Image (tube, helix red, strand yellow):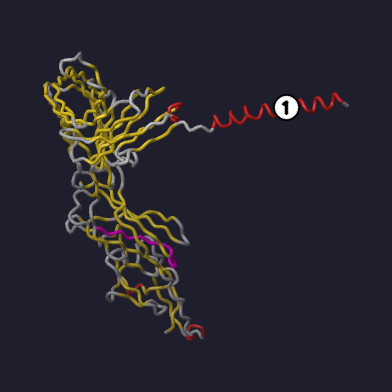
Amino acid sequence: MKRLIFLFVLCLLVGSAALPAHAATKAAKSQPTSRIIVSKDKKFSLTLYGKDVKKKISIKHMAGGENALASYQLLPRGTKLSQPATVTFTIPTQSSDFPLLLHKSGSSLEVVDKTTATHANGYLTLRASISHFSNLHLVKGIFSVQIADAYDPVLVGKTREHQYIVTHPKETTQTYRLAGEKITNKIEVFNTGLSGELRNHLGHSPHIYPFAPDSTSITEGFFLEKKPFRCVENKNDSIITKIYFSYAISIDGSKPTHESAVFEKWTKAPCISPTFEHKKPVVQCTGNVVLSGDINSHQSSVKSITATFFGKKHKTMPQAAGVINEEFGQYTITTQLPPDDTYEYRLWIELEDAPSTIKVHEGTFTIPPCPQPIVDSKIEKGEKTTLKALKIHDLHIKFIDTRTATGDHCEGEHYHSATGPSVTTIEGKILPDNDGCGYGLVKQVPIVEIDVAQ
């Protein structure tokens, strides 16, 4: 009995000793892997990683001055990090120039390597990594980059030229006022290399091309790059210019240090489709549908126009090709659909210089059911005669009341009214004629014999 009690107490002691270790393991797993500290003016942030997230660190904004875009002091001074931290500047600017990020400790002033600067929507965002604390100053740089902020809209299929210019002096004297201290430095640039790439915004399907990487060097401080981009889709997109700098820099005659940086800017480059004027669909209860409109002098660039239809009862129907009248700048699409249904339709055009079709219009229409045939009592009594007639669904048009024609934006011989702008069916329904295929193609409309009252 005493032995059982001893074992029981021993288990309790072992279990209670194990709990803190288990809790510590669980707490270790829940430790954050990063921590972001933001300055009071919201223009600067510091991201710490790993063990550094526990350190008591603060950011002090410092007054800027001549050629200084932003200055911050990281406290406490002399803090060393176990792994590099990320610093991010976000400041409004109207310039596309590439700034320098300077690291000042005491009288020492050096350039922070491997910075990435992005210009978009009137803001500059610059990121870099640091491994120890000091004063950080974002100042006017030595590289001047000229890139458009936005382009005027261009029609799909047309080409625009995009360019960027990079210049820098081989030698310059820069004056900064950093935290109240005026500093003048002689800066020399050696062995400057540059490579660039131009592409559309990857967040959208491509609307401009080509993807145009290029690599070269700046010659005598000047570089100009031009690339044509062709609009292939109707989107409000952007051209992204990314420039990779590799250079050596010397400050006040010091030994040149090799630096690298990445510059990125988004240029708004909208592409728009041609504007058409679309008329209201002409619909008959027989299922004959005519879509038409004006293409506003774009007929020379429009290769084809088609329509797709989706009914509530009759889901996806075959698409219908249109006819373009280049002389008058008009299009006509004629098709036959099952009646007594509501349809959504979309118009698509194919342009000479675009690799894909473009949707230019969409809408809805309803084909009403035709009235039921009226049975005359005289026919039931035998007082009748037999006539030749066109059968259009449940209605009949006397053959003698029609004529045939070709053309009229219709692909084939077709029927029109021979008595005026409309005909009256044997059942008493008035059917208006139209400028398209009228009452249907000769090869599609059946001819029947029908008994009618005398």
Comparing 174 with 57, the one in front is 57
Q: Is residue 3 magenta?
A: no
Task: Measuring from the top left, give residue 384's x and y in whole percent.
Answer: 45, 82
Q: Main secondary structure of the magenta part?
A: strand
Q: Is residue 367 visible?
A: yes
Residue 188, placed above or below residue 12: above
Kind of residue indicated by mark 1: Leu
Decide if residue 226 is in sight here. no
Q: Which residue is mark 1?
A: 13
Seen at 43% across and 77% down, the residue is 386
**Is residue 160 placed above or below 449 in the rendered structure?**
above
Q: Position of residue 353 (x, y in %)?
A: 23, 42
Residue bounds of the magenta highlight: 331-341
- Residue 196 point in image, percent of width and height: 23, 28
Element carrying mark 1: helix
- State yes or no: residue 335 in magenta: yes
Q: Nearer the viewer, residue 442 or 236?
A: 236
Q: In the picture, which quadrant includes the N terminus?
A: top right
For image coordinates 33% across by 58% down, the residue present is 362
Q: Quadrant of residue 419?
A: bottom left
User: Foreground residue, 129 or 373?
Assistant: 129
Is 355 situated left or right of 48 in this image?
left
Q: Nearer the viewer, residue 363 or 282?
A: 363
Q: Is residue 36 left or right of residue 30?
A: left
- Residue 290 drawn at (x, y percent): 32, 63
Q: Is residue 447 above or below residue 182?
A: below
